[in-house]
Image (tube, grey):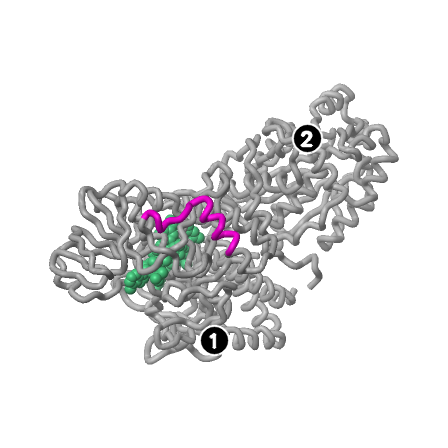
Amino acid sequence: MSIPTDHDSHAAATLGRDDRPVYDRGETVCVIGAGASGLVAVKNLREHGFAVDCYERETGIGGAWNWRHDRSPVYASAHLISSKPFTQFPDFPMPDSWPDYPHHSQVLSYLDSYADHFDLRPHVWFGTEVVRVEPADGERWDVTTRSTGGYGAERVQRYAAVVVANGHNWAPKTPMYEGLDEFTGQVLHASAYKDPAQLRGKRVLVVGGGNTGCDIAVEAAQQAARCWHSTRRGYWYAPKYLFGRPTDQVNDAMLALRLPLRLRQWLYQRTLRMTVGDVTRLGLPRPDHRVFETHPIANSQLVYYVGHGGITPVRDIVRFRRHSVEFVGGEQIEPDVVVFATGYLPRFEFLDPKLLGADGDGRPELYLNAFPRRQPTLAVAGLLQSDSGLFPLVHWQTVAIARWLRLRRDAPERSGSFQARVEADAGRRWHAADVEDSTRHWFEVAHVDYLRALQKALDELGVVA
Amino acid sequence: MTARDRVRIMRIRDWARPVPPARREVLHATPETDEGKPPVLFVPGFGHGAWAFAEHWLEHAAARGFAAYAVSLRGHGGSAAAPKATLRAYAHDVVQVAAGLPRQAVLVGHGAGALVVTRALARYPARAAVLLAPVLGDLGTVVTALRRNPVGTLPALVGGRLRLTRRQLFSRELPEPVARAYQARLGRAAARAQWQVLAHRAPEPPVGDPPVLVVGSPDDRVVPARALDRAAARYGHAPLLFPGMGHDLMLDARWREPIDAILDWLDKGASF
Ligand SMILES: Cc1cc2nc3c(=O)[nH]c(=O)nc-3n(C[C@H](O)[C@H](O)[C@H](O)COP(=O)(O)OP(=O)(O)OC[C@H]3O[C@@H](n4cnc5c(N)ncnc54)[C@H](O)[C@@H]3O)c2cc1C
Ligand SMILES: NC(=O)c1ccc[n+]([C@@H]2O[C@H](COP(=O)([O-])OP(=O)(O)OC[C@H]3O[C@@H](n4cnc5c(N)ncnc54)[C@H](OP(=O)(O)O)[C@@H]3O)[C@@H](O)[C@H]2O)c1
C-alpha cells in the first residue's frame, strides 16, 4: 500500500485562481493541524488508502499538549482529567507503567510516539500555516498556505477534500466588564498562564469554574498570598477518585447498566453528597442545575483548599474599579492579578463560516460535530468537548470521515442515504442531559450518546468493501 | 457487511474495568543495521514463554534485518504470575508490547497465542499478522487433542493443566533429549483462559485491515489440517504448510523453513 505522497512530486501548476497558479494535488486530502485530531486524521485517512498533506503552523506536533507552542493552553502543573482508558486512542494504548491521570508532558510524548509509530511526520508540512480554504470546481478545495508568521510567498493547492483539525481551545474568550480598562492590576487570560511563579506572593482573583479555573485556583491556594475564586453559578465538584477508582471509570460502570438519565443523575448526586458532602457549608454556591448539565469538573483539591481557607469563593463580577473588583451582593476585593479562566471560542479564520453552516454567533452546525450540511468534501475533526477524553471520540470520528470519503470515491451511487442523514441531523446534540446554555457547551457531548450515534454512522459507511 | 466485520466502538468494559497491569518479560534480538523493515512480535501459545522464540527465531529474524521480539503472556515464562488471567488480559499484554515498539509491528501468534493475536488485532492495527499452527478454539481441535492425548487433554477441560506429549509438539527428527528439555520448560495458562479457548465470542474484526498469513504443518498432532484450512479461509487464502513438522514449528528440528517463509512473505511486502 505505497502511496506517492512525496512532497517533491507536487504537480506543476496547471490551474489558476484569480491569476494565482493552483497546483493540483489530485485525490490527496488536506488536513489542517497536527495536534491530536490532525494526527489521528492523517493516520486513519492513510489507513483507508488516501494520500494526505497535513499543514501545521508550529514546528512540532502535539498542538495544545505541546506547551512550547505559543497558543498552547497548557500550564506547568496540568494533568489529565480523563483517566487513561478514556484518553488514549482505542488502537494505541498508553503504557501500563503510566499513572491513571498522566501529566501533560506525558501526553505530548504519547503523541510523539504515535506519530513515530505510524510514521506520520513525512506527511506533515511544519511551520506552514493555512491562510485560506476556498471551494473550487467539482466539490474540490483550493488551500492557500504560507510560512507561519507571514514570511515567504503564498502557495495555492487544490485538494479533493479538506479535514479541518485546528483545535478549539486556543482563542481566548474574555468577558467585558465595566471599568476593566481602568483597573491597574494585572489582567490575563488563562491561556497566558503557564507557571505558578506568575502568582507567587500575589493576591489573585481567578474567574471561571471550568477545569482551568479550578486548577489555577488550587495553584493560587498553594502559591499566592491570597486567592479568590469567582463563579457565576454553583457546580458539582467531582473528585478524581471515587471508591479508590478513577471517577470516570466508576461513572461508566454505572452507564453500562443503561439506567435512565434521571436515575443516574440522582445516584451520582447522592454519591457526591456522600463523598464530597455539602459544599455550601464551605461558602460555595449551591449548584443551579443537575449534575451532567454542565461540563464535568474533575478536581479533588478545590473543595479541600476552600476548606483550608486557601481559596475564598466569591460571586459573579459586577464591575472593576481602579484598584478593586466588585461582586454581586456588593463585596469588594483588591487583587494584584486577575486570571480569566473563562474558556475559549472556536475560530476558523481561514474559512468562510457559512461553509460550516455557522449561525450569527459563529457556532458551526455539523452532523456528529464533523460533517457540514452542504459540503460533502469538507469535514471538521476534534470539534468536540466530551464528558470524558477526546482522543477515542476523534479517532472514530476520523474513521467515519475516511469511510465517508472512501464511499464517495468508490461507490458514489451509494452515498445518498448518509448525505441525507447529514442534512437532517446537522446541529443535533449528542447529550441526553439538558446542558446549560453557554458557549462553553457548544460542542459538549456525552461520550456514550455520541459514540452510539457514531457507531450507526460507521455501520452505514462500512458497507463498501 | 456481516456482524463479523462490524467494528464495535462502545467498549464500556475496557473503559470502566481496564486490565490491571502485570510485569511482562520481553526478549528481543535487533539487526545490526536498520533496513526499515517492520518489527516482528512473537506471541507464544499457552504453556510456552518468550524463550520458545528466543531459541532460534529471534536471532534468525534479526539476521535477516527484522527487529524481533517475543513476549511472555502473563503467568508464562518470566512474566508475573497470573492465575486468574483471561484472553482479554493476554491480548492486552500483546497490544501493550506492540504499541511500545518504535514502528508498526507484525504480530505472529503460535497455538492459542494465535487466538490471542486475533483479539489483539481488534485493538492494534498491525502491519501484518501470522497465525502459526493456530488454536482458534474450534471443536475439531479439541476432538483431535482428546483422541491423540486423552490423559493430557482431559484435565484441561476441567480447569486442570494441559499436558502435551512430545509426539504432539515435535517431529521424530528432533533429538529425544532436546525434546525432553523443551517439554520440561512448559508451564500452563490460567484456567479461565483455557476455558475461553473453547467458549469465547468470535473476535472483533481486525482494525487497519492487515494481511494475515496462516502457517502450519499437516502433521501437527494438535491442530488438524482442516483447522488450518478453515483459519486460512477466514482471511481469504490457503495455509502455508510444512509437512513432517510437529506443533512447535519454532523449536522443531527444521525450524528454519517456516521462519524463512514468513520473513520472505514479509519481505515481498504483502502490505508494504
Ligand atoms: C488545559 C487543558 C486541559 C485539557 N485536558 C484534557 C484531558 O484531560 N483529556 C482530554 O481528552 N482533553 C483535554 N483537553 C482538550 C484538548 O484540547 C484535547 O485533548 C486536544 O488537545 C485537542 O486536539 P486538537 O488536535 O483538536 O487541537 P489542538 O491540540 O489545538 O491542535 C490544533 C493544531 O492545529 C494547528 N493549527 C491551527 N490553525 C492552523 C492553521 N491555520 N494552519 C496550520 N495549522 C494550524 C495548531 O498549531 C495546532 O497544532 C484539555 C484542554 C485544555 C485547554
Ligand atoms: N486538567 C485538565 O485536564 C484540564 C484543565 C483545564 C481545562 N480542561 C479542558 O479544557 C476545556 C476548556 O476548559 P476551561 O476551563 O478553560 O473553559 P470552560 O470549560 O469553558 O469554562 C469556562 C468557565 O468560565 C465561566 N465563564 C465563561 N464566561 C464567563 C463570563 N462572561 N462571566 C463569568 N464567568 C464566565 C464559565 O461559566 P458558565 O458555566 O456559567 O458558562 C465556566 O465556569 C474543557 O474541555 C476542559 O475540560 C482540562
Residue at mark 1: chain: A
* Magenta-drawn segment: A266-282
Q: Is residue A182 left or right of residue B190?
A: left
Q: Relative to the observer, which residue lies in front, A290 or A299?
A: A290
Residue A351 is left or right of residue B66, and the answer is left
Q: Is residue B102 magenta?
A: no
Q: Quadrant of residue A301?
A: top left
Question: Dot 1: what SS?
Answer: loop
Residue under numbered circle 1? A375
In the rendered image, the vertical position of residue B189 relative to residue A419, given as above or below? above
Residue A439, percent across and down?
A: 36, 66
Residue A372 position in % (x across, y down): 47, 73
Q: Are labels 1 and 2 assigned to the same chain?
A: no
Q: Considering only vertical position in the picture, is A203 above or below A166?
A: above
* Residue A267 covered by magenta stretch: yes
> As shown in the figure, which amino acid type bears the numbered disc 1?
Gln
Q: Amino acid at mark 2?
A: His
Disc 1/disc 2 C-alpha distance (Å): 55 Å
Residue at image x 71%, y 53%?
B235
- The reply to whether the residue tagged 1 has its Cβ within 8 angstroms of ligand 1 is no
What secondary structure is marked by label 2? loop
Q: Residue at x 75, y 19 (%)?
A: B177
Q: Position of residue B204 (x, y in %)?
A: 66, 52
Q: Is any part of residue A56 visible from this angle?
A: no
Q: Main secondary structure of the magenta part?
A: helix
Which corner quadrant of the figure contains ligand 2?
bottom left
**Quadrant assignment, res B140:** top right
* Dot 2: chain letter: B
User: Quick check: is the Cβ at mark 2 less than 8 Å away from ligand 1?
Assistant: no
Kindly identify the residue that appears in the image at 64 percent across and 41 percent down: B108
Q: Which residue is mark 2?
A: B48
